[in-house]
Protein backbone atom coordinates (compact mmCIF):
# COMPACT_ATOMS: atom_id res chain seq x y z
CA UNK A 1 0.00 0.00 0.00
CA UNK A 2 2.86 2.37 0.77
CA UNK A 3 5.04 1.04 -2.06
CA UNK A 4 4.10 3.74 -4.64
CA UNK A 5 5.91 6.36 -2.54
CA UNK A 6 9.12 4.34 -2.62
CA UNK A 7 9.02 3.29 -6.29
CA UNK A 8 9.96 6.72 -7.62
CA UNK A 9 13.33 6.53 -5.88
CA UNK A 10 14.42 3.27 -7.52
CA UNK A 11 13.53 3.48 -11.20
CA UNK A 12 13.25 -0.29 -11.48
CA UNK A 13 11.52 -3.26 -9.92
CA UNK A 14 8.34 -5.19 -10.70
CA UNK A 15 6.00 -2.25 -10.21
CA UNK A 16 8.15 0.30 -12.02
CA UNK A 17 7.10 -0.91 -15.46
CA UNK A 18 3.44 -0.50 -14.61
CA UNK A 19 3.98 3.02 -13.30
CA UNK A 20 6.33 4.09 -16.09
CA UNK A 21 3.88 2.97 -18.78
CA UNK A 22 0.96 4.60 -17.04
CA UNK A 23 1.93 7.97 -15.51
CA UNK A 24 -1.70 8.67 -14.62
CA UNK A 25 -1.85 5.46 -12.60
CA UNK A 26 1.38 6.38 -10.82
CA UNK A 27 -0.05 9.82 -10.05
CA UNK A 28 -3.17 8.22 -8.61
CA UNK A 29 -1.13 6.10 -6.21
CA UNK A 30 1.07 9.00 -5.17
CA UNK A 31 -2.01 11.08 -4.41
CA UNK A 32 -4.45 8.52 -3.01
CA UNK A 33 -2.27 5.80 -1.43
CA UNK A 34 -3.89 6.56 1.94
CA UNK A 35 -7.28 5.30 0.70
CA UNK A 36 -5.80 1.79 0.47
CA UNK A 37 -4.33 2.12 3.94
CA UNK A 38 -7.69 3.20 5.45
CA UNK A 39 -9.62 0.57 3.44
CA UNK A 40 -11.82 3.09 1.65
CA UNK A 41 -10.32 2.71 -1.83
CA UNK A 42 -13.59 1.21 -3.10
CA UNK A 43 -15.33 4.54 -2.40
CA UNK A 44 -12.65 7.24 -2.69
CA UNK A 45 -11.89 8.89 -4.95
CA UNK A 46 -15.33 8.98 -6.52
CA UNK A 47 -13.96 8.62 -10.05
CA UNK A 48 -12.84 5.01 -10.51
CA UNK A 49 -10.06 5.93 -12.96
CA UNK A 50 -8.37 7.97 -10.21
CA UNK A 51 -7.99 5.08 -7.73
CA UNK A 52 -4.78 3.35 -6.74
CA UNK A 53 -4.71 -0.42 -7.33
CA UNK A 54 -8.47 -0.52 -8.00
CA UNK A 55 -8.53 -4.33 -8.17
CA UNK A 56 -8.05 -4.47 -4.37
CA UNK A 57 -11.50 -2.97 -3.79
CA UNK A 58 -12.91 -6.21 -2.35
CA UNK A 59 -10.74 -6.03 0.78
CA UNK A 60 -12.16 -2.61 1.66
CA UNK A 61 -15.70 -3.64 0.71
CA UNK A 62 -15.81 -6.68 2.96
CA UNK A 63 -14.11 -4.83 5.81
CA UNK A 64 -16.84 -2.18 5.67
CA UNK A 65 -19.60 -4.81 5.65
CA UNK A 66 -18.02 -6.71 8.55
CA UNK A 67 -17.77 -3.41 10.45
CA UNK A 68 -21.58 -3.28 10.35
CA UNK A 69 -21.87 -6.70 12.03
CA UNK A 70 -22.00 -5.35 15.63
CA UNK A 71 -24.97 -3.14 14.72
CA UNK A 72 -26.76 -6.08 13.05
CA UNK A 73 -26.08 -8.25 16.09
CA UNK A 74 -27.38 -5.56 18.46
CA UNK A 75 -30.61 -5.16 16.47
CA UNK A 76 -31.10 -8.92 16.24
CA UNK A 77 -30.66 -9.29 19.99
CA UNK A 78 -32.96 -6.47 21.10
CA UNK A 79 -35.69 -6.38 18.42
CA UNK A 80 -38.54 -8.81 17.95
CA UNK A 81 -37.61 -11.34 15.28
CA UNK A 82 -40.44 -10.22 13.00
CA UNK A 83 -39.35 -6.58 13.14
CA UNK A 84 -35.70 -7.55 12.70
CA UNK A 85 -36.38 -9.71 9.64
CA UNK A 86 -38.63 -6.99 8.22
CA UNK A 87 -35.82 -4.44 8.55
CA UNK A 88 -33.41 -6.80 6.79
CA UNK A 89 -35.92 -7.39 3.99
CA UNK A 90 -36.43 -3.63 3.66
CA UNK A 91 -32.66 -3.10 3.51
CA UNK A 92 -32.35 -5.71 0.75
CA UNK A 93 -35.16 -4.11 -1.25
CA UNK A 94 -33.51 -0.71 -0.86
CA UNK A 95 -30.16 -2.12 -1.97
CA UNK A 96 -31.76 -3.66 -5.09
CA UNK A 97 -33.42 -0.34 -5.97
CA UNK A 98 -30.15 1.53 -5.50
CA UNK A 99 -28.37 -1.01 -7.71
CA UNK A 100 -30.96 -0.42 -10.45
CA UNK A 101 -30.51 3.36 -10.33
CA UNK A 102 -26.72 3.05 -10.25
CA UNK A 103 -26.77 0.82 -13.33
CA UNK A 104 -29.18 3.21 -15.06
CA UNK A 105 -26.89 6.12 -14.26
CA UNK A 106 -24.01 4.49 -16.11
CA UNK A 107 -26.13 3.97 -19.25
CA UNK A 108 -23.55 1.71 -20.91
CA UNK A 109 -22.05 -1.77 -20.67
CA UNK A 110 -18.68 -1.75 -18.94
CA UNK A 111 -17.62 -5.28 -19.83
CA UNK A 112 -18.78 -7.34 -22.74
CA UNK A 113 -17.57 -10.62 -24.21
CA UNK A 114 -15.15 -8.87 -26.56
CA UNK A 115 -11.65 -7.61 -25.92
CA UNK A 116 -10.75 -6.22 -22.51
CA UNK A 117 -7.60 -4.64 -21.11
CA UNK A 118 -6.03 -6.33 -18.12
CA UNK A 119 -4.92 -2.93 -16.80
CA UNK A 120 -8.22 -1.10 -17.26
CA UNK A 121 -10.85 -3.65 -16.23
CA UNK A 122 -13.62 -2.18 -14.08
CA UNK A 123 -16.21 -4.31 -12.31
CA UNK A 124 -18.47 -1.32 -11.79
CA UNK A 125 -19.60 0.42 -8.63
CA UNK A 126 -22.56 -1.97 -8.16
CA UNK A 127 -20.01 -4.54 -6.96
CA UNK A 128 -17.76 -2.11 -5.07
CA UNK A 129 -19.95 0.00 -2.79
CA UNK A 130 -21.19 -1.54 0.48
CA UNK A 131 -24.77 -0.28 0.21
CA UNK A 132 -25.01 -1.91 -3.22
CA UNK A 133 -23.66 -5.25 -1.96
CA UNK A 134 -25.80 -5.41 1.17
CA UNK A 135 -28.12 -8.20 -0.03
CA UNK A 136 -25.77 -11.17 0.62
CA UNK A 137 -24.88 -9.69 4.00
CA UNK A 138 -28.56 -9.47 5.02
CA UNK A 139 -29.32 -12.99 3.77
CA UNK A 140 -26.34 -14.27 5.76
CA UNK A 141 -27.65 -12.53 8.89
CA UNK A 142 -31.05 -14.16 8.37
CA UNK A 143 -29.41 -17.57 8.02
CA UNK A 144 -27.45 -17.03 11.23
CA UNK A 145 -30.52 -16.19 13.32
CA UNK A 146 -32.50 -18.99 11.70
CA UNK A 147 -29.72 -21.45 12.51
CA UNK A 148 -29.50 -20.12 16.06
CA UNK A 149 -33.24 -20.66 16.59
CA UNK A 150 -33.17 -24.13 15.02
CA UNK A 151 -30.14 -25.20 17.03
CA UNK A 152 -31.88 -24.40 20.32
CA UNK A 153 -34.92 -26.47 19.30
CA UNK A 154 -32.69 -29.25 17.96
CA UNK A 155 -31.09 -29.61 21.40
CA UNK A 156 -34.54 -29.90 22.98
CA UNK A 157 -35.48 -32.45 20.33
CA UNK A 158 -32.42 -34.55 21.18
CA UNK A 159 -33.27 -34.41 24.87
CA UNK A 160 -36.96 -35.36 24.61
CA UNK A 161 -37.00 -37.30 21.35
CA UNK A 162 -39.38 -37.15 18.35
CA UNK A 163 -42.37 -37.14 20.70
CA UNK A 164 -42.05 -33.39 21.08
CA UNK A 165 -42.93 -32.98 17.39
CA UNK A 166 -46.21 -34.84 17.95
CA UNK A 167 -46.92 -32.63 20.93
CA UNK A 168 -46.35 -29.54 18.78
CA UNK A 169 -48.94 -30.80 16.29
CA UNK A 170 -51.50 -31.34 19.06
CA UNK A 171 -51.07 -27.94 20.74
CA UNK A 172 -50.30 -26.04 17.55
CA UNK A 173 -52.64 -23.15 18.31
CA UNK A 174 -51.05 -22.54 21.72
CA UNK A 175 -47.45 -22.51 20.43
CA UNK A 176 -45.81 -19.23 19.43
CA UNK A 177 -45.08 -18.75 15.74
CA UNK A 178 -41.30 -18.93 16.21
CA UNK A 179 -41.50 -22.37 17.84
CA UNK A 180 -44.02 -23.58 15.30
CA UNK A 181 -41.86 -22.59 12.32
CA UNK A 182 -38.64 -23.86 13.90
CA UNK A 183 -39.99 -27.32 14.73
CA UNK A 184 -41.66 -27.52 11.31
CA UNK A 185 -38.29 -26.90 9.63
CA UNK A 186 -36.53 -29.39 11.91
CA UNK A 187 -39.17 -31.98 11.07
CA UNK A 188 -38.55 -31.41 7.36
CA UNK A 189 -34.78 -31.65 7.80
CA UNK A 190 -35.25 -35.08 9.40
CA UNK A 191 -36.85 -36.31 6.16
CA UNK A 192 -34.29 -37.57 3.68
CA UNK A 193 -36.28 -36.61 0.58
CA UNK A 194 -36.69 -33.05 1.89
CA UNK A 195 -32.95 -32.75 2.53
CA UNK A 196 -32.26 -33.96 -1.00
CA UNK A 197 -34.77 -31.45 -2.35
CA UNK A 198 -33.24 -28.57 -0.38
CA UNK A 199 -29.64 -29.33 -1.36
CA UNK A 200 -30.35 -29.98 -5.03
CA UNK A 201 -32.57 -26.90 -5.20
CA UNK A 202 -29.62 -24.87 -3.94
CA UNK A 203 -27.36 -26.41 -6.57
CA UNK A 204 -29.92 -25.82 -9.32
CA UNK A 205 -30.35 -22.15 -8.39
CA UNK A 206 -26.57 -21.70 -8.20
CA UNK A 207 -25.97 -23.14 -11.66
CA UNK A 208 -28.93 -21.17 -13.02
CA UNK A 209 -27.38 -17.94 -11.75
CA UNK A 210 -24.06 -18.80 -13.41
CA UNK A 211 -25.57 -19.87 -16.74
CA UNK A 212 -28.01 -16.95 -16.83
CA UNK A 213 -25.10 -14.51 -16.97
CA UNK A 214 -24.27 -15.73 -20.46
CA UNK A 215 -27.87 -15.55 -21.67
CA UNK A 216 -28.34 -12.05 -20.30
CA UNK A 217 -25.02 -10.58 -21.43
CA UNK A 218 -24.30 -12.53 -24.61
CA UNK A 219 -25.51 -9.67 -26.84
CA UNK A 220 -23.83 -6.91 -24.85
CA UNK A 221 -21.37 -4.62 -26.55
CA UNK A 222 -18.92 -2.44 -24.69
CA UNK A 223 -20.29 1.08 -24.62
CA UNK A 224 -23.75 -0.08 -25.71
CA UNK A 225 -26.92 0.85 -23.87
CA UNK A 226 -28.25 -1.55 -21.25
CA UNK A 227 -31.77 -2.89 -21.64
CA UNK A 228 -34.30 -2.92 -18.82
CA UNK A 229 -33.94 -6.71 -18.54
CA UNK A 230 -30.20 -6.39 -17.89
CA UNK A 231 -30.76 -3.69 -15.27
CA UNK A 232 -33.38 -5.76 -13.44
CA UNK A 233 -31.19 -8.86 -13.64
CA UNK A 234 -28.13 -7.10 -12.20
CA UNK A 235 -30.28 -5.50 -9.50
CA UNK A 236 -31.73 -8.80 -8.25
CA UNK A 237 -29.18 -11.51 -9.11
CA UNK A 238 -27.51 -11.37 -5.69
CA UNK A 239 -30.73 -12.47 -3.95
CA UNK A 240 -31.21 -15.91 -5.62
CA UNK A 241 -27.47 -16.52 -5.45
CA UNK A 242 -27.43 -15.87 -1.69
CA UNK A 243 -30.58 -17.93 -1.09
CA UNK A 244 -29.03 -20.83 -3.01
CA UNK A 245 -25.94 -20.76 -0.81
CA UNK A 246 -28.16 -20.75 2.29
CA UNK A 247 -30.11 -23.76 1.00
CA UNK A 248 -26.82 -25.60 0.59
CA UNK A 249 -25.49 -24.53 3.98
CA UNK A 250 -28.54 -25.15 6.19
CA UNK A 251 -28.59 -28.99 6.02
CA UNK A 252 -24.80 -29.09 6.35
CA UNK A 253 -24.94 -27.09 9.59
CA UNK A 254 -27.00 -29.88 11.17
CA UNK A 255 -24.80 -32.73 9.95
CA UNK A 256 -26.82 -33.64 6.86
CA UNK A 257 -25.87 -33.34 3.21
CA UNK A 258 -24.67 -36.81 2.23
CA UNK A 259 -22.05 -36.89 -0.49
CA UNK A 260 -21.96 -33.10 -0.83
CA UNK A 261 -21.12 -32.73 2.86
CA UNK A 262 -18.52 -35.47 2.49
CA UNK A 263 -16.82 -33.60 -0.35
CA UNK A 264 -16.93 -30.20 1.36
CA UNK A 265 -15.65 -31.53 4.70
CA UNK A 266 -13.01 -33.85 3.23
CA UNK A 267 -9.57 -33.78 4.84
CA UNK A 268 -8.16 -32.72 1.48
CA UNK A 269 -9.36 -29.15 2.16
CA UNK A 270 -7.78 -28.87 5.63
CA UNK A 271 -4.38 -27.81 4.31
CA UNK A 272 -5.51 -25.32 1.63
CA UNK A 273 -8.05 -23.81 4.05
CA UNK A 274 -5.16 -22.44 6.11
CA UNK A 275 -4.03 -20.43 3.10
CA UNK A 276 -7.35 -18.66 2.50
CA UNK A 277 -6.75 -15.55 4.62
CA UNK A 278 -3.21 -14.98 3.36
CA UNK A 279 -4.28 -15.57 -0.26
CA UNK A 280 -7.21 -13.20 0.23
CA UNK A 281 -4.89 -10.38 1.31
CA UNK A 282 -2.07 -11.20 -1.11
CA UNK A 283 -4.22 -11.36 -4.25
CA UNK A 284 -4.10 -7.59 -5.09
CA UNK A 285 -0.30 -7.58 -4.78
CA UNK A 286 0.07 -10.69 -6.95
CA UNK A 287 -2.22 -9.21 -9.60
CA UNK A 288 -0.24 -5.96 -9.49
CA UNK A 289 3.06 -7.81 -9.99
CA UNK A 290 1.54 -9.86 -12.80
CA UNK A 291 0.09 -6.88 -14.62
CA UNK A 292 3.33 -4.93 -14.27
CA UNK A 293 5.71 -7.71 -15.29
CA UNK A 294 3.93 -9.86 -17.86
CA UNK A 295 3.44 -7.77 -21.00
CA UNK A 296 2.47 -4.39 -22.36
CA UNK A 297 -1.02 -2.98 -21.99
CA UNK A 298 -2.96 -4.89 -24.63
CA UNK A 299 -6.45 -6.18 -25.09
CA UNK A 300 -7.41 -9.81 -24.81
CA UNK A 301 -10.43 -11.99 -25.45
CA UNK A 302 -12.78 -12.68 -22.58
CA UNK A 303 -11.78 -16.38 -22.55
CA UNK A 304 -8.10 -15.44 -22.28
CA UNK A 305 -8.97 -13.06 -19.47
CA UNK A 306 -10.60 -15.98 -17.59
CA UNK A 307 -7.48 -18.13 -18.13
CA UNK A 308 -5.35 -15.29 -16.77
CA UNK A 309 -7.62 -15.14 -13.71
CA UNK A 310 -7.07 -18.82 -12.95
CA UNK A 311 -3.34 -18.31 -13.40
CA UNK A 312 -3.34 -15.50 -10.86
CA UNK A 313 -5.37 -17.71 -8.53
CA UNK A 314 -2.78 -20.49 -8.65
CA UNK A 315 0.11 -18.05 -8.21
CA UNK A 316 -1.66 -16.41 -5.26
CA UNK A 317 -2.08 -19.78 -3.52
CA UNK A 318 1.61 -20.51 -4.09
CA UNK A 319 2.62 -17.18 -2.55
CA UNK A 320 0.22 -17.81 0.34
CA UNK A 321 1.79 -21.24 0.92
CA UNK A 322 5.32 -19.84 1.26
CA UNK A 323 4.12 -16.97 3.45
CA UNK A 324 2.19 -19.42 5.66
CA UNK A 325 5.18 -21.75 6.07
CA UNK A 326 7.84 -19.06 6.55
CA UNK A 327 5.94 -16.36 8.48
CA UNK A 328 2.44 -17.23 9.67
CA UNK A 329 3.10 -20.73 11.00
CA UNK A 330 6.23 -19.79 13.02
CA UNK A 331 4.33 -16.83 14.54
CA UNK A 332 1.43 -19.10 15.50
CA UNK A 333 3.90 -21.58 16.99
CA UNK A 334 5.51 -18.87 19.11
CA UNK A 335 2.20 -17.33 20.21
CA UNK A 336 0.86 -20.74 21.30
CA UNK A 337 4.02 -21.48 23.34
CA UNK A 338 5.04 -24.31 21.11
CA UNK A 339 1.60 -25.90 20.81
CA UNK A 340 0.58 -25.40 17.18
Image (cartoon, rainbow, N blue to C red):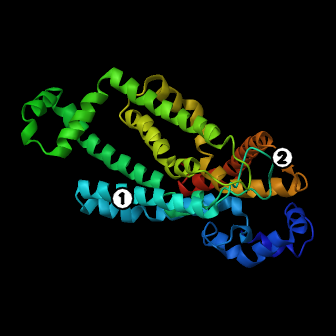
Category of crowding for the residue at label 1, using alpha-carbon neighbours closer than 10 angstroms: few (below 14), some (14–19), many (at least 20): few
Question: In the picture provided, is 152 more to the left or to the right than 127?
Answer: left
What residue is shown at x 86% (from left), y 63% (from top)? 18
Q: Is residue 300 above or below residue 200?
A: below
Q: Nearer the viewer, residue 65 or 205?
A: 205
Gap in Å between the C-alphas at discs 1 and 2?
Answer: 41 Å
- Residue 75, position as x, y percentages in the image: 31, 63
Viewport quadrant of the N terminus: bottom right
User: Which residue is painted at 22% across and 32% down in the image?
Assistant: 158
Question: Does label 1 or label 2 sit earlier along the sequence?
Answer: 1
The local crowd at label 2, few if under 14, some if 14 to 19, many if 20 or more residues have their Cα within 10 Å, is some
Q: Is residue 331 left or right of residue 294?
A: left
Q: Secondary structure at mark 1?
A: helix
Residue 206, image x and y in percent? 52, 36
**In terms of secondary structure, where does tag 2 sit?**
strand
Residue highlighted by disc 1 = 90
Q: Position of residue 65 (x, y in %)?
A: 49, 61
Mark carried by residue 300: 2
Q: Position of residue 338 (x, y in %)?
A: 56, 50
**Residue occupying the point 56% across, 52% down:** 231
Which disc is residue 207 wearing? none
Residue 317 vs residue 171, the one in the foreground: 171
Amino acid sequence: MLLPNAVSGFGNGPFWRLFSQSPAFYGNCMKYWWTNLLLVNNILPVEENERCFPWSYYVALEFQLVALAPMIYFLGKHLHHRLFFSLLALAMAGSAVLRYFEISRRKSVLLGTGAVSHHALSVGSVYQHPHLMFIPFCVGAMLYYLYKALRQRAEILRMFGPGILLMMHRIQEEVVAEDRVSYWLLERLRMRHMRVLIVWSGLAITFSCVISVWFIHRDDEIGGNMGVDVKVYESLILLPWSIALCLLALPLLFGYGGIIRGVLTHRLWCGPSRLVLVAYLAAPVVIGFGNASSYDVITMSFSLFIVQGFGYMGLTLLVAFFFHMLVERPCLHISSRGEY
